[in-house]
Image (cartoon, rainbow, N blue to C red):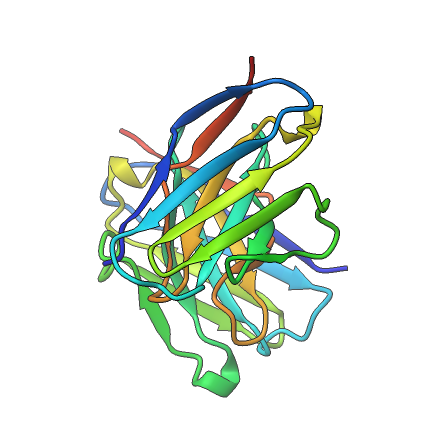
Amino acid sequence: EVQLVESGGGLVQPGRSLRLSCTASGFTFGDDAMNWVRQAPGKGLEWVGFVRRKVSGGTTEYAASVKGRFSISINDSKTIAYLQMNSLKTEDTGVYYCTRWTGGASYSSNWGQGTLVTVSS
Amino acid sequence: DIQMTQSPSTLSASVGDRVTITCRASQSIGDALAWYQQRPGKAPKLLIFQASNLESGVPSRFSGSGSGTEFTLSVTSLQPDDFATYYCQQYYSYNSFGQGTNLEIK
């Protein structure tokens, strides 16, 4: 069974940093792209960014709203995907979901339960 | 960036009804469209991919159609569990989501 478990959320002041983790199991990590989506309180879904699968180079892409501040990386041996968030803004507040893109597709076939990030002074 | 627009934003229906949600893309995306269902406090769940392909385990009362810029999600014979928020997502160029359709009980 595929499982994605996010952790690392919490309350952080504007301008500070936070790193989220997504621990994956139940599939061959590295064979699939790993993706992050967020949802502000009471709002819709917003794509954050993704890391391509190894066979596609393992490179990353980001939404314009987070480019230059957020970065995604993976630890193959621990099967963890990370979302490093720097220079946080109040508008980054929300639930952050880790998702899996199966094979070469770019839709999310599996989702974690989400972790809440609150950016506030 | 590709903008996705869903309509309606809110839809009121009764158990047993048939409903349709529309999603329009700001440019042609072929059939690179997925639909998700999100219940309150839960993560979204994939229903449909490639515009019309039903994800494994999803009831056959859900169906998707369309290509290019206009897509629809239909649900026949609504069940109590179906009252939730639905999102379309394009994956032709990275990802972007529609704003969501809240399907509520009439």
Q: Could you say which quadrant of the image residue B40 lies in?
A: top right
Q: Residue at x 45, y 75 (%)?
A: A52
Taking depth in this image into account, of A92 and B34 the one nearest to the observer is B34
Taking depth in this image into account, of B63 and A93 the one nearest to the observer is B63
Q: Quadrant of the C terminus of chain B?
A: top right
How many labels, in total?
0
Quick check: B46 left or right of A20? right
Measured as percent of width and height from the top left, residue A63 is found at: 28, 58
Measured as percent of width and height from the top left, residue B8 is found at: 39, 30
Q: Quadrant of the N terminus of chain B?
A: bottom left
Q: Is residue B21 visible?
A: yes
Quick check: B73 left or right of A72? right
Measured as percent of width and height from the top left, residue A36 is found at: 45, 56
Is the residue A108 above or below the residue B100 in the image?
Answer: below
Q: Residue at x 56, y 73 (%)?
A: A32
Measured as percent of width and height from the top left, residue A57 is found at: 43, 85
Is the residue B59 above or below the residue A70 in the image?
Answer: above
Q: Could you say which quadrant of the image residue A100 lies in?
A: bottom right
Q: Residue at x 63, y 24 (%)?
A: B17
Q: Is residue A116 visible?
A: no
